[in-house]
Structures are given as structure tokens and as C-alpha cells.
Amino acid sequence: MSENHSVRKNSEDQYAHELEDKIVDIVRRCRNCNYCSMVCPLFESTRGFQVQSPSGILQALSYAIKLGEVDGGMQTDLRDIVYACTTCGSCVLKCKSSGPGVPLVDAIEAGRELLVERMVGPMPEQIEALESLEQEGNPYGEPASTRLNWLREFEKKQKLTYKSIPAQKAEILLYVGCTPSYNERISETAIAVMKLLEAMGADYGILRDEQCCGCTAKRMGEEGLFEELSNKNFEAFRDSGVQRIITISPHCYNTFVNEYQEDMKEITIQHYTQFFAEALAQKSLIPKHKIKNTVTYHDPCYLGKKNQVYEPPRQILNSITEKSPVEMARHHDDSLCCGGGGGRMWFEPEETERLSETRINQALAVGANIIATACPWCHIQLEDAVKTSGNEGKVEVIDVAELLAEAVAEREDG
Amino acid sequence: MTNRILVIGEHGNNVIRDVTWEMVAQMGQIADKFDMDVQATILGHDCEEMGQTLSEYVEHLYYISDVNLSNYTWECYLHALTPLIDKVDPSLIVLGHTAMGVDLGPRLAATLDCSYLADCIDFTFDGDDLVVTRELFGGKLLSKLKVARSNRYCITMRPSGMGETETDKRSVNNFTEITPALDTEGFMTQFLDLLAPPEGDVDITKAEIVIGVGRGVSDKDKVKVVQTLADAVGGVMAATRPVIDSGLLPKERQVGQSGKTVKPKIYIACGISGSSQHIIGMKKSETIVAINSDPKAPIFNIAHFGIIGDLNEIVPVLTSGIQSRK
Amino acid sequence: MEIIVCVRQTAVVREELEVASDGRSVDLSRVNQHLNEWDSYALEEALLLVQENGGSVTVVSLGPENAEPVLFHGLAAGAQDALHIVSVVQDDIDNWVVANMLSREIKKHPFDLVLTGVQAEDDGCGEVGATIATLLGIPHASMVVAVECEEGQNTLKVERELDEGYHDVLRISLPALLTIQTGTRQPRYVSSMRLKRFKKKAKITKIGFEDLVSVGETVAPRTELIHIDSYQPETRNVEILEGSPEQTVGQLLDRLYSKGVL
């Protein structure tokens, strides 16, 4: 293979060339066995073109780099190929378990960084999200000043106990995240989590000026923006003196644990399912009644595949359901991606069947009438899919926190 | 300054455009108030009949006829207008804030070296000073501006979208045809072609029920949800410019100044904030329902019924409400 | 092709704006600024035309010192040069002054095309482009949605947007000025990192008003701001329905069916 891939213009391109080298080096390790295609949700839900599989995406990227075509004539084709990946990581697990252990998703994300640097990426639909992130600290185009409106609205009906960080000190920081803050349905998850923390008498608080964790920026290839957001957040966490951070979204969890500054390791970071599973085990939370429905748990990719957190949500569900929860045919590290990760909440490639609708059918196939989720995006994707697949009334999508909060609450009728 | 106002009229498809009727009516009111008289001009070829029609409503109508004026270009219009303006010596030149107004207005004003103000909602005279009212920030704020005292002003007025307005007939025998015999040798621009909007599968201008979507409807799924409502109620979907620009619906569904004008029995505006460019395309709808989460959205200024809320919640409930009443 | 692009910074307004107590200004201190959306399409058109036909792009902006970011954006996106006509608080500016000053600077440079956006997001006047063209004595075309170079000739074919969905096509001789409409070719995204790199090393040429006028000459504005108000529509006859979605929809349908609309 020639070392002279891509025309070396001048040192201005150094950053781009480093990315190109990184990608080509990773792709060189691929054996083209295509085992990754077997587990790739993009490959499964599209029409079978090789470029819609992990190895295919990387071959396309690699050739574009070697032929100097990254910002040449095939721009948007390459961009569409590289951005279609949900970054679920199924391929990474498969490649590790069957051989070379190529860090496929890292290479794809480096490809996105390269495309952004070359001003070919991101997807046009994602540009507004990035501008909003930079200006308002959330990807939804909403003013930063309204970030706590969900809480203010709720407190008109019922007061909650929590501290406002940094003005007040607390042991635990509940990191709410952008989606629960700005999406009304998902704010109910945040409220459920707060009710649970209150029931435990936990010493916790919420940031007064919370900003996006930055995961979205990173997935879209905007490394600079990710750095800005992560620096601001890290300083806020460090200055607050909290010892533990609980997140609602697995995306925030993943990025704090795996992508933030080294010093973040001094703080205990948990997804709320881990925290509440512990609480149940230690009896600081006691379920008062059990849910009678048939529940199935949908493993979010960013909690499961990326971080191997599979059991805590199950432990919670086991202790609050009358009937044992049922497992879908695809579960744990074989869970089917809902299609919302990797920047795909903002655009959708042409699919033969929408991933989230496939997942609904998989839930119905095991007789579930509740799909329990532990991720705001899985929740939105699956709840939308219930409607678009015409299954309203047959199955509901409810967050694990909401189910637990209901189980723990005092019922009026005793 | 003189007491003459000159309205530069527009026509298309062999009729005087609504915006010109609005200008004439508005200028009529100004003229009454400030003791001025309203003159107008139409430029074109084979437009005598239109000129005659318009002449009944103004003090004087100048019809400038030339084969090079068959299609609008600022250059031909400018060459034809400057001698007329010298002759009539209006102190106020008025155009509609339309594609033509935006293109010709500043050029004409700069050529005549007179002050120019665009997209005025209202104006008045304060002595010899012209005072205009304009929007800022897409309608969030209103500004009042005074134009430096001058012998001549040129403004474009925002079309109100209300179409023909009552005007008093003014005079008769006030029609002058001018044939400037334009010599386009050395002109810097040349008209090549006029492209009509593409024929779509649906002619939204003929629909009785139109459901308009705006920026609040931001992806294919949300479009589908609204389409379900349109199907339930037997209506057609239309959209504002940003939705069309992002490719969610085809161009023939665009309602607004650069799209189509609709006057259905009912227009349901979903997630539309109500920019003036859109409103002008649907203002004449018999009943307007607006659904928007922002209570200050300008759409509520022209709506008959409003629901403040998240369209993702409201639209499905509306759909099932209609289905259950069938 | 030598192309000059006029760009401007405008406020990104996501919330209600407050008018200062003197009624003559708006508090924009906590509002984000960005490149005017129409100008971003003009910039992209320029960059693509030069990519396709060779040449270079110069961006120019008239604005206060803190309006530099749009010029760095232009350079990071691929423009070769950036000119900043710096306005100071004492300068009395309206669109006439802007067009006049810009044309004085542009005149000093060789160019084939000047591109501007159709209008600015904050005032929506749409006048600066055509005014500059008149002052420069060059032809203009406004609301341009497509540009085609004519091989071997010193002309362009442009497609323009008219009202009611119509378009027209003109031939225009160079040098010329075009005002570019939104929705033409998608502006490229300039990342945070790219922008930072260009902010560190790129050079912007600074020009003051005094560099553009002769001794003792001033370009006076032709309009004077009297005051600014929050927009109160004169009449608002809407009936706002209150309650849950089920309640409001129920009330709405009751009214529509009883009126015979549905």
C-alpha cells in the first residue's frame, strides 16, 4: 500500500492528515471477514449494500483518503455513508470476539472528524443542532434560559427537594441532560428519578446552569465543540465538590466515563439504574407494590454494548414486577439498536424497515405490553415507533425510573 | 417638494396585481390626509386595457409601452421610468415590497440619488419629513424611522395581503400612453426566459381545507402525523418556505410571497410562527386555526382560533377527534 | 473569477428582545451573533464558483470590532482575504452609509463579481446589494437562485426567484453584483476547531471610515431612528382555547362543526 495517500498540501492540513493516517492504520487491520455486517443494525435495516456495513463504511473512507477524494467529487456520497452509522458498537464486540478487534467505531468517528475538518460533513440536518449546542448548550434550538422550565412547571403542582449546585453543596449531582430538559415526555423520567432520590433521602442537587455533555458533538465529528463543552462541564463538576454524578442518559454516562478528562475518575459516575439497583439491594428503596404487566427490557447500546451495564436495570425490574420480565430474542450485547445514536436523532437514511419498528415487533413477539427503556433516545425512538407501526394500545414504552417510582410510591388507596 | 405621489404598478397574467390595488388604496388615504395627488404608472407591452382600468382610480395613469417592457427587468424599467419621473416630479415614489420592488426600488432610488426605505408597514408625513414604521427581527420589534428631509423619497410598502381594497374613483380622461422606443444596445442585462411554477400533483390553491406546516414540523415523521390529519379531514398539506427549503415537501406546496396564495374555507397552521412572507399567502382564508407552542407567535394575530401547545400532542388528538365524529 | 462577498453579523434571536429604556436601542448583550443566513448562502456560492472556475474570494464586512467572527468564518470556509471596515460607536450608520462605504472599498479591488445575501435577518430591507451595484455602475440581479458561467464570454446566466413560484432567467454582463437567496447551495459547516485555527493565524485587513473618504468629507445617513417598540398588533381577534389537548381539540371541533366549516 502506498504511503502517499492524499495530496499533502501544507502544514495547514496537519490535523486532517493525522486523522487520515489514523483511519488508514485502523482499516489496514480489517480482514474483510464481514462478520461485523452480520450484527450491524444499519446493514440489517437497509438494502444490503456493502457500504452500509462497518467494514464497507471503512473501506469507502480508506479508499477516499488514498485517492485524495475526501473533499473531491464524491463528497456527499462519502458523507452519507459515514454518517449513517448509529455507533452502537455491535461490530466492535463481534470483531473483538472473533479476531482482530478492530476499533471500527473509533475509525468511523475519526472519519466524521475528518469530514467536518474538510467541511464536507456533518449532515445538513445536523448543522442547526451543532449551532444550537454552541450558542445555547443544547442541540434542540431552545434558549439556555428555559433549560429548567420543566422543573419550574412541575413544581407549580408539587414541590421537590433538591439543592441548586453550585450555590449549595451536595454529595450527589443529578446530571439531567438536554433531552429530559427540553422534551416534555422525557422530563417525566427526570421527575421520576428525583422522586426516587427524595424517597431515599439522598443529598443531591441539580446544576443551575447545566450544559450538554457534548456526546452529540463528538458523534457528529465536532471535536472542538466537544472539547469546549467538556471543559466547561468538567470545571463545573470539579468546583461543585460532588462525589457522585448520576446521569439519566447512557450517552452522558458513556461520555463522562470514557471520553472526559482523566480527573473525572475521581468522581463516581453512575447511570441511574446502577444507583437505584444498589439502593434496592441495600433496602434504601422499598417497592410497595408490583407491576402486573408483562415487561421486557430494551438494552440501550450506550449502556449495554459500550459499557457492559446489563444487570442493574434487570435487577430493578425483577424486584418490581409480579411476573418475571421477558427477554426479547435479541438482548444484552445482541440488543437491536433503536437507531437513535450516532447523531441519527437528526436524520434517517433510507431504510427497508425502521429499526425502532422492528424492535417493537420483537417486543410484541414475546408477549410484552410494556417496553422498559433506560435511555431518552431509545424512549423517543420506540414510543414514536409504537405509533408509526400502528401498535398503539398494544404496547407502552415506559422508562425504568418511571416504573420504579410508581412501584415505590404510596398509593392513595393504600 | 411637490404634492405628487407616483405608484409604480405591477401586473402579471394580464391583470393588475393585488399589491398595486393595495398601494393605490393606501396612497389614496395618504393623499386625502396630506393634500397630495396619486398618480400611477404601468409598464409593459399590450397592456393598454389594464392601464385604462387602473386609470379610473388615480389622478393620472401613465402607461409606458415598449416591446422591451414585455418582461420585467430593472434595466428596461429604469430607462423607461427616469424620463417620466423627471416629468411628473413626484415627491414620493411607491413600489410594493415584492420581487420587483426589492429589485427595482433600491436601484431606482440610488440612480435618482434619493432616500429609500424598504418594507414599510405604515408611513406618514411630519411636516416635510417622511416617517415610516418597519418591522425588525422578523416581527419581534417595530421601529419608527424618520427620513432626512429631502425633495424626494422612494419607499416600498409591505403588501397587506388583503387584495383589492375600496378605493374611490378619482377621475376620467387621465390616461397617457408613452412610447419611449427603448434602445437596448449596450444594456448590461438581457431577459431570457420566464419559468412558471412546476405543475405538482396537487393544486393547493383549489383545496377547501389546507393544513399548513412550519418549522415546528421538522422531520418526515412529523410530516406524516400531519398528513394523517389532512387525510382524516379531507384536506391538503402546504408548508412555509423553510420546510420546503429543507426538502420535506415539494415546492408546489409552498404558501407565501414566493409561493402560492391560498384562500380555503379553513387553514390550519401547525407549528407556523407567522412570518409576514407566509401570512400574505394565506391571510384571506375564511377560517384560520393556529397551533403553536409560542403564545406570542405572530400567527395568532390573524388566526380565528388558537391552541397553544405542542403540535405533536395536539395534532393526533385532532385527527382522532375528527375521525370519531365521522 | 475574482469574487467579493459582503457579509454581516446578525443576532440569533431565540427569545423575546428587550427594548432599552431610551426606546432607541435593543439589548443584544446576551444574544448570540452569527453570520447572516443569506450571506452564508452568498459565501457558499462564491466558494463553489471559484472551486469550479478558479480565482479567489474576498470577504468584506462593515461592522464594529466585535463583528470579526464572520470574517474569520469566511477565511476558514475558504476565502483568501478578509476586509473589515470597522465602525465605531460615534459613526452614524444606516443602510445608505453601509452601501456607500462598502462600494468605496470594493472599488479599490479588481473583481468580476460581488455577491451579497438578499437581505439581513434583523432589518429585512434587502437594499444594500442593489445600492452598491448602482454606486459601482455595474448591473445587478437580485433573488438569485442559480448562477451559470457562460463559456468564453464575459456574461453569466442567472435564475432569479419572483413571486408566486415564478422564476426568470437573465443574462448579465460582468462585472456584476448578485444578491443570493437562501436555499441555493447548502453552506458548508465551519467547525469550532477550524475557526479557532484561523482566528489564531489569519489576517484581516482593517479599514476605518477615514480611509474611505476625502479630508472633511462625511457620508451622512439618510434615515434617523426615532424609536423602537415591542410589537403590539393593533387587533387580535383570536379565540385562544384553553385546557388539555383533549379539551381544546373538543372545543375547536365543536366550533368548527357548528360554524359549518367542517
Image (tube, coloured by chain):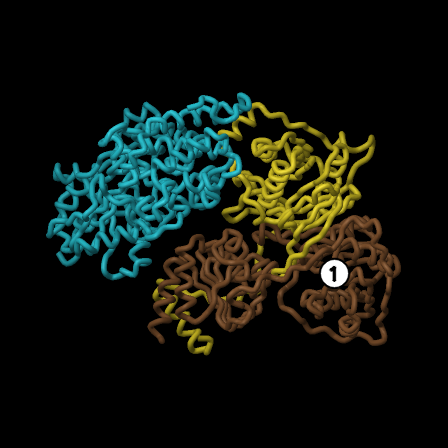
Q: In which image quadrant can residue A164 be found?
A: top left
State the residue position of label 1.
B71
Q: Identify by letter the chain in yellow.
A: C
Q: How many marks?
A: 1
Left or right of A137? Residue B110 is right
Q: Give the colour in which the image draws chain B.
A: brown
The amino acid marked with disc number 1 is: Asn
Visible in this render: residue B179? yes
Query: In terms of image quadrants, where is residue A27?
Result: top left
Q: Is residue B154 left or right of residue A34?
A: right
Identify the image quadrant of the C terminus of chain B: bottom left
Q: Position of residue B85 (x, y in %)?
A: 84, 58
Horizontal side of A92 relative to A65 (left or right) equals left
Report in which chain the residue with disc 1 lies.
Answer: B
With B18 as the anchor, is A42 left or right in this view? left
Give the residue drawn at x 37%, y 35%.
A213
Residue A163 in view here: no
Q: Position of residue A237 (x, y in %)?
A: 34, 30
Instruction: Measuring from the top left, give residue B214's x and y in whole percent.
Output: 49, 57
Residue A123: percent from the left, percent from the top? 46, 42
Whether B249 is drawn above or below C63: the answer is below
Task: Tell me the element at label 1.
Answer: loop
Within 10 angstroms of label 1, few (less than 14), some, or many (20 or more) residues?
some
The picture's colour for chain A is cyan
The quarter of the image holding the N terminus of chain B is bottom right
Question: Please, which residue is most extreme toward the front here?
Answer: A1
Q: Nearer the viewer, residue A308 or B118?
A: A308
